[in-house]
Amino acid sequence: MKQIKRKKEKKLLKNSPGKKWLKKPFTSIRVALVYDRVNKWGGAERVLLALHKIFPNAPLYTSVYHPQKAKWAKKFKVKTSFLQKVPFARTHHQFFAPVMPFAFRSFRFDAYDVVLSVTSESAKAIQVVGYVKHICLCLTPTRYLWSGYEEYFPHTIIRNLTKPVISALRFLDKKSAQNPHKMLAISKEVQKRIKTYYGRTSDLLYPPISLSFSKKKKKKGDYFLVVSRLSRLTNYKRVDLAVKAATQLSFPLIVIGQGNARYLKKYAGPTVKFVGNVSDKKLQTYYRNAKALIFPGKEDFGLVMVEAQAAGVPVIAYKAGGALEIVKEGKTGVFFPKQTLGSLVNTLKYFDESIYNSKSCQENSKRFSFSYFEKSLKEYILKAIEE
């Protein structure tokens, strides 16, 4: 079997375009995109749409695709794995974690020059041969296996029962993380995790902002704002803290996001309003009229904080994770030191919107522009191929 595989790889290597395309314009590079699953909407999906602007002809490979829950993906030519035909895989992907790496290894990429995997789970498991370069844009090492393990498995009994499975999944995940030729991290926080959990070095490339805002001076806000995915599977975002704090203080709070919010509504008082998922145009309006964005979770990066800053809105964030790289304390926002209700309530009590200049917030967001992202990524790809 090994001999047959070697012969096949040699044939692919012989027929590979190699470095011929380096003599052509950048637009002649054949690029493929890979993403864990296309069945939701969030910050990572905005990154994919940004990549689509850069590589409009690149197909999107993924494990499963749910067209109704991922209408944003209509722009792509989506190619799915064998899991697409498996019952419940599109809606309950978490139960198929053990076979996800094998689903991605079933794809073939010898028709491309560069494969860019965007992943927080198994998409990095793809395998390429010949001159094809695999660059991984890592959103974070698989959260439920590493940094978020205790949040996903809070009970000791469940941890003990799942220990053999988790150990096997960690082994596969770490092995898959060695596949990419190059690895990009979306924040310094993610860089640290990649080094800790995968034993690899990575380069930094912040994701770009996709919403555009006018540069007019912001008026005084009417409410506090939370923008997040909402479900029990994303408890680590700690939206419950913002809901409880606003209820306790009788402060107006608007919660925007896709997902089942029933578990959050039980904490909400009359001043808290859930508006579900909204269009980008409406989202821009919600940002512009907010006193501040509340960001209570420890995130890998936190693109919604950049969006708020671009709207001239200050951010009230938990002092950890990607927030430390985005918010400039005292200038574009404020941190609360502990991820507790008391800490957030105390910060909200003394929050004064008037001390924050909308122009300073907007200037801060320029570090995360699309043009800078595009230029940096293209240069990185060229360098990776030349090496």
Image (cartoon, helix red, strand yellow):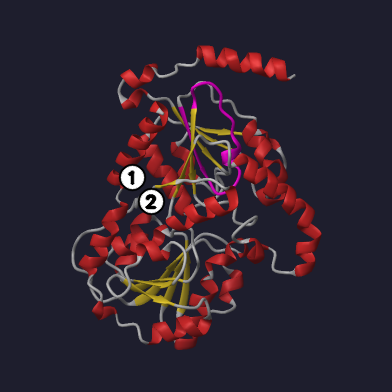
Apparent side of residue 145 relative to residue 134 in the rendered image (left or right): right
* Picture quarter with the C terminus: top left
- The secondary structure type at the circle numbered 1 is helix
> Is 155 rendered above or below residue 31?
below
Q: Position of residue 18 (x, y in %)?
A: 44, 18
Instruction: Name the residue at 43% across, 61% down.
Output: 322
Instruction: Locate the N terminus and report the quarter of the image it occupies.
Output: top right
Tell me where residue 293 appears, x and y as whole percent: 38, 70
Could you say which is closer to the camera, residue 72 or residue 180? 180
| Circles 2, 1 touching at the beta carbon (< 8 Å) | yes
Q: Which residue is mark 1?
A: 373
Residue 88 visible in the displayed image: no
Crowding at label 2, few (<14), some or many (≥20) Cα neighbours within 10 Å? many
Give me the disc on residue 137.
Answer: none
Q: Amino acid at mark 1?
A: Phe
- Label 1 crowd bin: few (<14), some (14–19), many (20+), radius 10 Å: some
- Asked if the stretch drawn in magenta spans residue 135, the answer is no
Type of the residue with mark 2:
Tyr
Vertical order, 219 against 306 (above or below): below
In percent of the image, x 30 and y 23: which residue is there? Answer: 25
Residue 319 is at least partly visible in this image: yes
Distance between mark 2 and mark 1 Cα atoms: 7 Å
- Residue at (20, 66) in percent of width and height: 359
Using the image, determine if residue 137 lies above or below residue 41.
above
Residue 130: in magenta span: yes
The magenta-colored residue range is 114-132
* Element carrying mark 2: loop
Left or right: 320 in relation to 223: right
Q: Is residue 315 left or right of residue 201?
A: left
**Residue carrying label 2:** 206
